[in-house]
Image (cartoon, coloured by chain):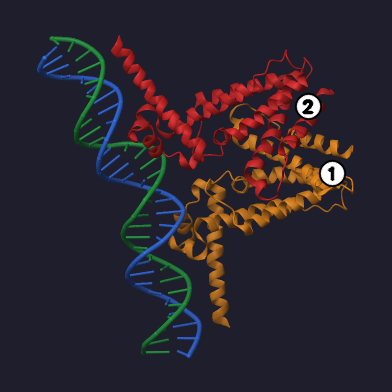
Chain colours: A red, B orange, C blue, D green
Amino acid sequence: MVHDSQTTDLQGDTKTRILDAASALFLEGGLPALSVRAIARRAGMSTIGIYSHFQGKQGVLDALYIEGFEKVSAAMDIDLSEHGPREAIMLGMKRYIDLAEKYDAHYRLIFGEADPDYEPSPEARRAGVEAFARLIALTSSALPKDATLAEKQEFALTLWATLHGFVRLRGNAVSQLVEIQDWRPMILDAAGRQIDAALEL
Amino acid sequence: MVHDSQTTDLQGDTKTRILDAASALFLEGGLPALSVRAIARRAGMSTIGIYSHFQGKQGVLDALYIEGFEKVSAAMDIDLSEHGPREAIMLGMKRYIDLAEKYDAHYRLIFGEADPDYEPSPEARRAGVEAFARLIALTSSALPKDATLAEKQEFALTLWATLHGFVRLRGNAVSQLVEIQDWRPMILDAAGRQIDAALEL
DNA sequence: TGACAAAATATAACAGCGTTATATAACGCC
DNA sequence: GGCGTTATATAACGCTGTTATATTTTGTCA
């Protein structure tokens, strides 16, 4: 019926409106700007609305957390039949670096840097596991076919840690201590050395 | 005079008492536990005391920030005449990993993960620069004598990023996504590969 | 169409936060 | 002893996330 679909649309609209408001605030000012009252004001409703449509701030952060890891998953989604292993992995690394820069607030959230009190829900965690699985699928292309899961995990983690380390040093501490111009080639060189070491096996 | 030294002692005592209280709260519960009121309660004074002896929370965080980077400096302080380059650097890496685990709250603070609003003071930043200089002095032992400053910085950053990446993945995201047992050898292997690549030049 | 249950919304409040204005007590010094 | 400076205490402001209460809107059934 018309009434039913209208009602559903409005509910969906309300949820979407809240998420859009939260996303915008998050992108603009990070977590400090993401107060429940600010989200509600921007979405044109009372603060209580955040609690009826989500479970308060935790629910909103969960949605942003999932959004963040979905972007990671998308960045790792590379067709292995179109590129050689090294080329494919390097493409993924580049996408990862861009993503971390573009969605800084999301990136901080999924790596636990934003809100010390926030704990991702089981559903949100699933999005993280999925992203890691995509990463493993990508990086394993540089390993022998008979590599164990542990070996695949270790190699994926090594590359992830290399990227993450540079990205965090760039975004947090080091850029205030020393002046570095070209982060990108430096990061990709370091990652490339790890890939080459794996390819030599 | 007796009165002078007494006064000075008491002032020093008060400052020390505040810092001890803050340090203890920080170690126990991280930043969420480090409220101005909690520090004052633990130090046995009114909240205003934190503002007369430090510049509020910013001042306390600055002290902890410096404390954190001083620990990093100490970890990088290795006598190069007693070890070969690779051995010396690996020792520094091990110390770094231990430090990050033991002083988790400090580590998060100096890498900007604790309080989104906190900005280290110029004096605090100096402690960070000093720690980075120590790291460069250590890691440069693996490079040719005629290496440029930029090359030295790049290599130091590469190793730092490798460690930091693993440490943060372990402490924040990944340990909730996959189960990894032996982080230490994995981290040291990854760092070792970067060192070997530099030694081969 | 009118009545009643249910869901969504609004207002106001609670406890906590960092910070500060005001008021009181303690201190060194002349 | 009295004065000026300093440290301490109390209370308040505006903010935070959250919730209890009250109101309005909505959906369903007679």
Residue underneath mark 2: A195
Pinpoint the chain carrying mark 1: B
Name the amino acid, label 1.
Answer: Glu
Query: Badge 2, how many Cα within 10 Å: few under 14, some, many 20+?
Result: many
Residue under the image location 63 percent in, 24 percent down: A75
Say if labels 1 and 2 share a chain: no
Dot label at residue A157: none
The residue that mark 1 highlights is: B87
Residue B7, position in %: x, y? 53, 75
Please tell me whether mark 2 sits on a helix, a strand or a loop: helix
Q: Position of residue A162 (x, y in %)?
A: 71, 34
Q: Is residue A4 above or below residue B96?
A: above
Quarter occupied by the N terminus of chain B: bottom right
Give me the residue at 74% from left, 43% from top.
B157
Count of labels in the image: 2
Q: Secondary structure at mark 1?
A: helix
Nearest to viewer (mark 1 / mark 2): 2
> Residue B49: x, y in percent?
46, 64
In the rendered image, residue A108, in percent from the top left (x then y), is placed at 57, 36
